[in-house]
Image (cartoon, grey):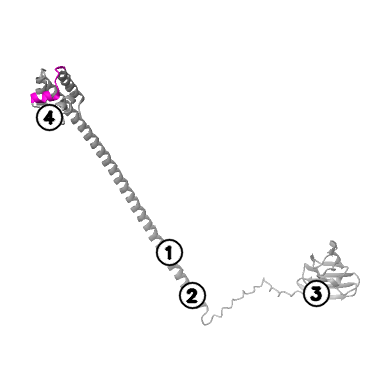
Amino acid sequence: MPDEKLRELGEILRTQRESLGLTIKDVERETKIRSVYLMAIESGNDNISPGKAYFRVFLKSYADFLGLNGLEFSKRYQEITEAKAGEREKGRNVEQSDTRKTVAAEDRASRTRRKSETKKAKRRKRSAKITGTLLVIAIIILAAWGIWKGLDYLRSQKELGENTGPGHDNVPEEPPITGNEEPTPPEQPVKVVRTDTSAEVSVFETNESPIEVVLETLSGSDVSCWIKAEADGEVVVEKTMGSAEKIELSADKELRVRAGRPWVLTITVNGEDLGVGGSFGPVKDLVFKYNEDL
């Protein structure tokens, strides 16, 4: 590529040649310098000649032929080429410096990555070691627990065998009765006795208090029954019961129920089913009393 300063030298030579009325062919014939080199000198391109030394000789000869100071042109060319060489060297130094910086930066980055990977590997190794230790501890704990449970089972089986061997009938011993304790009397079964029955009144006695009575009407489209109930002398309900309706009543001593249609009313006293309250007929009183002597 032509150099700007060399082009300036070539422009001086071209101007001088044209002022003398000479062509490139004229100069080639007189100086024996090929026209291609002459045109390269005028264009400032020293890369086309056989070499830098030849270009310098051709430049000096061409300037002398045109009546110019060839030695001065030769010196000027030397200065230009040396300056270019210095710039190239400087460029190479800068490039090498940049290369060294890049390599150094990459080396630092590589070392940093290696350190980071080493730290990660150490952390993974340490984590795996901790996990393994915890797993071993868990296995030991589970094994110890299993052994303890097995021994406890064997001990319980041994004790069971001793208690069920000859001479042991597994019947729990009753605690002895001391002089200050009285034997608990056996629990009496619940009794419900119908003691007085007439068309207007039915009386039931029970040995359990409180007296729990459940009244329930039969199911049917035309079934209904008016009732009025008194528990221990106090009215607790008065209403007309519909089909399949249930009422639960309770009293400590006496419960008295007046029923308008007792034949549609079923009665349960302290869990015992007594059937319907009566046959078809007039209003009837159903009296339930507590009697501890039953």
Does label 3 or label 1 sit earlier along the sequence? Answer: 1
Does label 4 or label 2 sit earlier along the sequence? Answer: 4
**Which label was assigned to residue 157?**
2
Numbered disc in front, either 2 or 3 = 3
Amino acid type shown at disc 1: Leu
| Circles 2, 1 touching at the beta carbon (< 8 Å) | no
- Asked which quadrant contains residue 134, the reply is bottom left
Q: Position of residue 166 (x, y in %)?
A: 52, 82
Disc 1 marks which residue?
Answer: 142
Q: Which of 49/16 is in front? A: 16
Q: Is residue 18 left or right of residue 196?
A: left
**Which label was assigned to residue 274?**
3
The reply to whether residue 294 is visible in this rendering is: no
Numbered disc in front, either 4 or 1 = 4
Looking at the image, residue 178 lies above or below residue 2: below
Numbered disc in front, either 4 or 2 = 4
Q: Secondary structure at mark 4?
A: helix
- Report the residue at 37% width, 55% height from top: 130
Q: Which quarter of the rendered picture does the C terminus lie within? A: bottom right
